[in-house]
Image (spheres, rainbow, N blue to C red):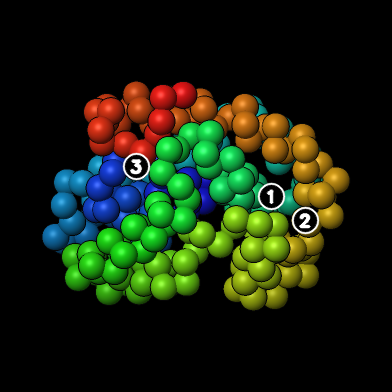
Amino acid sequence: MNYLAHTLLSKNNIEYQLGNILADPLKGKRWLGASDEHYAGMRMHVAIDIFTDANATISLSKSRLRKKGYLKGVVIDMLYDYFLSKHWDIYVDQDLPSFVEKFNQDAQFALDELPAKAANFIELIASNNVLGSYTNFAGLELAFSRIDTRLSPRIIAKETTSSYIPNILDNYADIENDFLEFFPSLISMFLEKSKVKPDEHFFNDL
């Protein structure tokens, strides 16, 4: 799962959300001054990744793209965020633009609590409205093109994320159904593992 899903699969608490997003760039290491909520968010990110990597539906989605491919996991993560944006109202009562706007605002006010590398990372996400960038397929394509500019020449010689677009379009309906089957189970895992109270999370009564 990508940034939008990790932000949603969090307590309604900006420190928890930031910890969830920052687990990868900070390699899961708790920084000096990190709060318990920051660290709880980082641990949840790890739990989400473990659950996702072991899930048969995720494996099926990857296999629908290509038999082999170094970037299949990245593409599916981003594609699932796109489908989350598309089907947002199934899972959350608050509309997506309001959710994203609140996160972007809260994140800007919380930057001083973060180490410089993490603050710069979050500043880019908030100022570029990354969480709201997948609301249509054109936005997803643009995100792929941005990822491709950061790939090494060695990887580009083999594949890019944009090169998967024809595969996505050929298997669009099946992968969308995979997402709709998978995401409720991920929500259930989050609710059980985090032990959040009903007023501490973003999900409606599924």
Residue 151 lies in what quarter of the image? bottom right
Q: Amino acid at mark 2?
A: Tyr
25 above or below 46?
below
Q: CA distance from mark 3 to mark 1?
A: 25 Å
How dense is the environment of label 3, judged by Cα within 10 Å: few (below 14), some, or many (20 and up)?
A: many
In the rendered structure, the answer to whether residue 127 lies left or right of residue 29 reads right
Residue 24 lies in what quarter of the image? bottom left
On the image, the x and y values in percent for residue 17 come to 32, 50
Name which residue lies at 70% across and 75% down. 153
Q: SS of the residue at dot 2?
A: helix
In the rendered structure, the answer to whether residue 56 lies left or right of residue 197 reads right
Mark 3 lies on residue? 10
Q: CA distance from mark 2 to mark 3?
A: 30 Å
Compare marks 3 and 1 and give the one earlier in the sequence.
Answer: 3
Q: Mark 1 or 2, which is nearer the eye?
A: 2
Name which residue lies at 41% across and 54% down. 98
181 above or below 74?
above
Mark 1 lies on residue? 72
> Mark 3–mark 1 contact, CB under 8 Å?
no
Q: Amino acid at mark 1?
A: Lys
How dense is the environment of label 2, judged by Cα within 10 Å: few (below 14), some, or many (20 and up)?
A: some
- The answer to which of 148 and 80 lies nearer the viewer is 80
198 above or below 105?
above
On the image, the x and y values in percent for residue 202 come to 36, 38
Mark 2 lies on residue? 164
On the image, the x and y values in percent for residue 11 come to 29, 41
> Mark 2–mark 3 contact, CB under 8 Å?
no
Q: Amino acid at mark 3?
A: Ser
Q: SS of the residue at dot 3?
A: loop
> Mark 1–mark 2 contact, CB under 8 Å?
yes
